[in-house]
Amino acid sequence: MSLRSRLFSRRDPYARDGAEELFLAAMRETLEKNAAGSDKYAEILRREGFSPEMLKTEGDLAKIPPIPTLYFKRNRLFCVPERKLIVRAASSGTSGNASEVGFDLSSLLIGFGALRRFFRFHRVTSIIPTNDIVLGYEPAKHNRAGAVKTAYLTTKFAPALRREYALKDNGAGYDINIDGIRKALLGYAKSPFPVRFVGFPSYMFFLLKTLEKEGISLALPARSAVLLGGGWKEFSGESVDRAEMLELIEARLGIKKERCFEFFSAVEHPLAYLKCACGHFHIPAYSRVIIRDTETLEPLPEGEAGLLNFITPLVSSMPLCSVITDDIAIFGTAPCPCGNPAPYFDLLARSGVSGIKTCAAEAGERLVDR
Ligand SMILES: [Zn+2]
């Protein structure tokens, strides 16, 4: 069993005891694989004066040259032959400005296993069949956006009886399917099986507002759940809107806030983070977070806002060991009242905030040009 497999197969995703050494060893293992599989990446490491054996303590993790996600929007950087990439996904973004990522079988199996354990740990997985409302795109051949795959995958953590999409494939593009969603929802409400909502928060909010306007209040079956992730742009950091959303969910659908799960994930960092009752994204033992200055990319002390840098040894097919997203976050270690002992990050703003993108773009250019 590889060190990476051992790290990701631990039952409690957050338990750090004994996992620190394993984490560093797994990082060295994947970094070596990445460098051996890509001359271009080996060259980046050399140029930055870094080699995997330099990783001796947690403090050394910041030395791994972090690659901005923007780099992957402009460059293809695979560490295995392309025929070995089982799943390819693109980040959401306008065409021509999406990163393409590719995962080989080992990365997929390990990642999927970790996700399954993560969802089971948080009691999101269920064997009871569900009726699903996907608040996102229907999977289609013409759309390879990672968000589609994530939403589709998430619906599989409980066996789906039926599935209705907010954006329906018409062969060439998408049609907004508000009527279909409303109809499906009213039908689902009469069924004894739980209902699952999966997708973008902004769509969920829109649906709730529509129900409110029409005076519709449902009491969906027990164990119904709301799973939200991605595209939180409009609401990020706005606790009022989050609270309002939770209230609306309970009032309009009869789903309590304990059954509302808010996830964070990125195409370039395909792991899930779950927002706790206190609003923090706790960090599992198989990843680390460093917050970096938006200008200099230097690591910032706890409590200061900067660019979110994820570190994980999950992916062997691409150099995703240390990636900087263009999201703004804060790192924290203070004991959280929710009881989860793991450190956490708070998301302040998701990508696209003016001024920030430019800096991350520049960092990307720097890596490419030198
Ligand atoms: Zn917490």
Image (cartoon, helix red, strand yellow):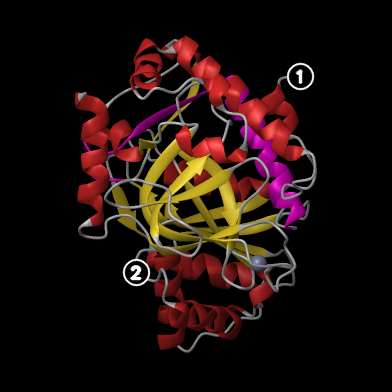
Q: How far across and down, in percent of the image, does residue 156 sit?
A: 64, 45
Q: Amino acid at mark 1?
A: Met
Q: Which residue is mark 1?
A: 1
Tell whether label 1 touches label 2 (CB within 8 Å): no
36 relative position to 142: left or right: right
- Magenta-tinted stretch: 93-122
Q: Quadrant of residue 124?
A: bottom right
Q: Position of residue 336 (x, y in %)?
A: 67, 69
What residue is shown with label 2?
A: 234
Where is ligand 1, by quadrant? bottom right
Asked if the magenta segment contains residue 230, the reply would be no
Of mark 2 and mark 1, the one earlier in the sequence is: 1
Q: Quadrant of the C terminus?
A: top left
Residue in the foreground of this view, choosing between 116 and 286: 286
Measured along the vertical axis of the image, is residue 350 above or below residue 4?
below
Mark in front: 2 vs 1: 1
Q: Secondary structure at mark 1?
A: loop
Residue 220 shows in this picture: no
- Asked whether 122 or 339 is in front, the reply is 339
Residue 172 placement: quadrant: top left
**Ligand 1 has an atom within 8 Å of the beta carbon of the residue at disc 2:** no
